[in-house]
Amino acid sequence: MHVERGDTFVGLLTLAGLDGIDAHEWTRATTTVFDPRRLQPGHGLTLRFASADRELLQIRYELDGRTLLVVERTRDELTARREKLPYIAEVRGVAGEITQGLWQDVTDAGAPPEVASQLADIFGWDIDFSRLQIGDSFRVLYENIWVVGARHGAPGKVIGADLVSGGETITAVLFEHEDGRGGYYRPDGKSLGRMFLRYPVEYNRISSSFTHRRFHPILHRYRPHLGVDFAAPRGTPVRAAANGRVSTAGWLRGLGRTVRVDHADGLRSTYGHLNRIASAVRNGRPVKRGQVVGYVGSTGLATGAHLHYAVEHNGKYVNPLSLRGMAADPVMSNQRRAFKQQRDEVTGKLARLAGTSTPIVVTMRRPSR
């Protein structure tokens, strides 16, 4: 992730799913070598978690072009240090055709899973990934960060991508301002972003769709299913779909452990059957779009691990996958010239990508920020 104006160390760690006590503990550990109040917009922050239990293992923060702040757990304590190690931010590109599914095909082509997951957020409202067909195609440019001495690079942001589905091409270009804010835009400058994330969880499949008549697998009777079920492994992080304030964080009848968030314009989102709720998420507290609010489970009336995701508008349930409005603002007029320069370079490099079994290094400037 990249720091944006107004971000704090504690806030960014909470956004990633740490509870308040752990977030403050890690932040205090930085003070031996760095003042955490001096975060700089646009600088990179990388968090490394244990895959099994999502325990935070290490923080890397880009102090400047040649110095990193590294905080990590050693035995039973947190230690911080500065690393005078240069790193290389290269741009890689990969292209291919759809044969199995977007996530599988992008990773089979050699891109990291994190890149495939970013594509779901970037294009989620414009392309129904379940309807991609054999012969559709993708091209992606993404950052790969190498620290000297490391055995592997770490994936950064997607810089540009296009997807061809049913003969239609949708192109996304990353454009960021000096304060670290920005997003993905079409070549004409219109935003691909929305107020709501379409997918609040990285999922394997949609196991049950929104319907007013579904046969319940436990109750054995027909009843409405006023949400979408995403099948995903137990413990998969669940993200808030939009900015808002928590109205429920606890057990809610058949939904088991549940988080509900009230948003602007009469909207409310619900996340049910959670294995556990993120400890920083409590009634009355604000949450940000993309903040981890809990983890996939099977509490309540559930036959297996999945997320039940529902959205209400003015008290009436709506299909969460149909919320296509609420687009983010386009590129501002005073940023048009810089955007066009970035767009022309990104789209030019995308056009030159050919299908390959391994990612290739692309020579280009890093995106504006």
Image (cartoon, helix red, strand yellow):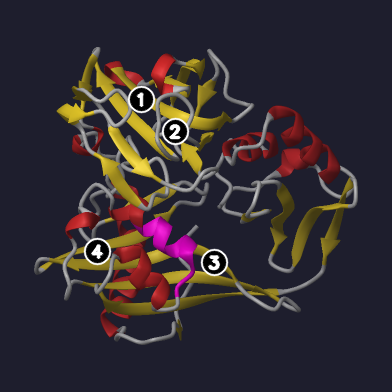
Please check the rendered image and state whether residue 113 is part of the magenta-colored stretch, yes or no.
Answer: yes
User: Which residue is label 3 attached to?
Assistant: 155
Neighbours of disc 1 within 10 Å: few (<14), some (14-19), many (20+): many
Label 4, label 2: how far apart the Cα atoms are: 26 Å
Q: Name the residue carrying label 1.
A: 269
Q: Amino acid at mark 3?
A: Pro
Q: Residue furthest left?
A: 167
Residues tagged 2 and 1 counted as in contact (Cβ below 8 A): yes
Q: Is residue 273 placed above or below 127 in the rendered structure?
A: above
Determine the residue positioned at 36% across, 64% down. 103
Residue that badge 4 annotates = 171
Of discs 3 and 1, which sits in the foreground? 1
**SS for tag 2?**
loop
Q: Say whether residue 201 is visible.
A: yes
Q: Is residue 342 visible?
A: no
Callout 4: helix, strand or loop?
strand
- To which residue does mark 2 refer? 240
Q: Which residues are magenta?
A: 111-119
Between discs 4 and 3, the one toward the N terminus:
3
Q: Mark 1 or mark 3, which is nearer the start of the sequence? A: 3
Q: On screen, 176 above or below 138?
A: above
